[in-house]
Image: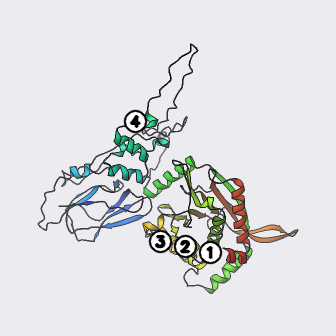
Amino acid sequence: MFEFILPDLGEGIHEGEVLEWHVKVGDTIIEDEPLIDIETDKAAVSIPSPKGGIVMATNGEVGEIVYVGNIIVVIDDSGNGSNAVAPVAAAAETVSTPPVAATLAPAAEGFKARSIDHKVPAAPATRKLAREMGIDINTVNGSGPAGRVTQDDVKLHASGAVPASAAPVVTAPVVAPAPVPEVRTPTPTTLSGGASTGIPFLDVDPLPDYSLEGPVEIEKLRSIRRKVAHKMVTSKSIIPHVVHMDEADVTDLDALRKNEKSSREGQPGGRLTLLPFVIKAIISGLKNYPMFNSSLDPFREEIIYKKYYNMGIAVDSERGLIVPVIKNADHLSILGISSQVEDLAEAARTGNIDVSSLSGGTFTITNVGAIGGTGFAAAINYPEAGILGLGRAQDKAVVRNGEIVIRKMLPIGLSYDHRIADGAQAARFMTGIVKLLSNPNTLLLEG
C-alpha cells in the first residue's frame, strides 16, 4: 500500500481546501494523472498521483481543509487489487501540523486522523521548529500578541519551563502597615471559539441569527477569501495606518503612452497602461526613501530594509484578491514591466499562476481606476510598510499659470506604516512620484 502524504505546496503554505477529487474509492488511477485539486491561500493547484494503482481511501471532502504532511489518499500499487488497507493511524499521529477531522471512505477503517478545536496562531518557522522538536504546537502557551506562539515559547515548552506571560505574579513582602495597592494583570479577551484577542475591552460577540428575520444565503469562507480576511484583520489590527493623498498631472505621460501603444501593438508589453510608468516612479521613490520598502519585526523590534524591489500588483479574480509579484522590477524596462503585468494578471485571473509568483513582495500597488473612484485608502499588504492606490485618471479643470486649463489628473494615495515612517517622509516620497509622473522626460531619465 502507498500512503500519499500531501506535499509542500510552496513557501509558507501549510494547508489547503479541497476543491475537487478526480478519483473515488475503487477507481484505478495511472501515475501522473490528476488526483486532487486544492486551493491554497494563494492559488488553486492540481496535484497528480505519484503512483498508479487502485484507490483504497481518500481523506478530505470537498470544502474541507487538508494539511501538508497528512495522508490524503491510500493507493494499492501492488497490482493485485487487494482490498486490505494497512493501518495508518500511527503515521497520522506523528504529524504535528493539525489535521482536520476527516470523513473517510468506508473502505479505509484503519485510516484515522486527529481532530482539533482550533489552530493556535504561529509563524510557519515556529511550526517547523515545533515539528522538528516533536512538539504538538497546539499544547504550547503563546506569549505573543493575540496568544501567538513564538519560537521562544516552543523552546520553553520543550524545557518544561513556564512562559513569562503565564508565570505567576510574585509580589514583594509588605514591610509597612500602609495598604498595598492591588496589582492586576490584564485578562486577555476571549472569542466565542476560545481564542484570545489579547486586546483589553475587545469583546467579539457571535452574530445574531439573521434567518429569524428573513431568508438568508450562506457561503463558506474559502481559502483565498479566508486568507484575505486574515491578512486584512492582521494589517488593520497591528499596523497604524496613515494615508497621504495627492494628484499627478499625467497629461503628457498619457500622450506618450498612447503613441507608444499604437506603434507597439502586438509586441510583448505593447498593451501599455499607466501602471508600468507608475511602478518605475515608485521604484525611484523607494530608493530615495527606503523606509517604504521595509518591514517592521515587532518581536525583535527591528526594521528590515530590503535592498531589492519586488512589486506586488493587486489583481481582482473570481476567487478573491490575488497579489502577483514582479521580481526585481528595478532591473526591467517599462516595456518589460508592462509585459510582466499582462502575463501575471492573466495567470492570476485564470487560476494558472505559479505559487512562486505570489510571494516575496516588498511594496504593493492597487489600481481601481479602470472600475471607477476618485481615490481611496488602501489597506497595507502586511507585513509590507506601504501600498499605493491609484484612482481613475480623468480630465479635470485645473489652474496653470493663472489660467484654467483641462489636464488629465491621476489621483494617488499612499497608505503607510506610521511606526516606520513619518508624515514628512511620506509627503516627500509622494511629491517625488508626482514630479516624475508629471514629466515623462524626467521619469525616463531618472526612473
- How dense is the environment of label 3, judged by Cα within 10 Å: few (below 14), some, or many (20 and up)? some
Tell which circle, 4 or 3, labels the residue nearer the N-terminal end.
Answer: 4
**Whole-percent x, y for residue 79 in the image:** 13, 68
Identify the amino acid type marked 3: Ala
Identify the amino acid type marked 2: Val
| Residue 341, numbered label | 2
Quadrant holding the C terminus: bottom right
Quick check: 282 above or below 88? below
Tag 1's secondary structure? loop
Q: Are marks 2 and 1 in contact (CB under 8 Å)?
A: yes
| Residue 369, numbered label | none
The figure's colour scheme reads: rainbow
Identify the amino acid type marked 1: Thr
| Residue identifier under label 4 | 162
Give me the C-alpha separation between circle 2 and circle 1.
10 Å
Q: Are marks 4 and 2 in contact (CB under 8 Å)?
A: no
Tell which circle, 1 or 4, labels the residue nearer the N-terminal end.
Answer: 4
Asked if one can make out residue 249 in the rendered structure from this viewpoint, the answer is: no
Identify the amino acid type marked 4: Val
- How dense is the environment of label 2, judged by Cα within 10 Å: few (below 14), some, or many (20 and up)? many
Q: Of discs 2 and 3, which sits in the foreground?
A: 2
Q: Which of 185 and 172 is in front in this view?
A: 172
Q: Are marks 1 and 4 in contact (CB under 8 Å)?
A: no
- In the current view of this chain or complex, which residue is farthest to the top? 177
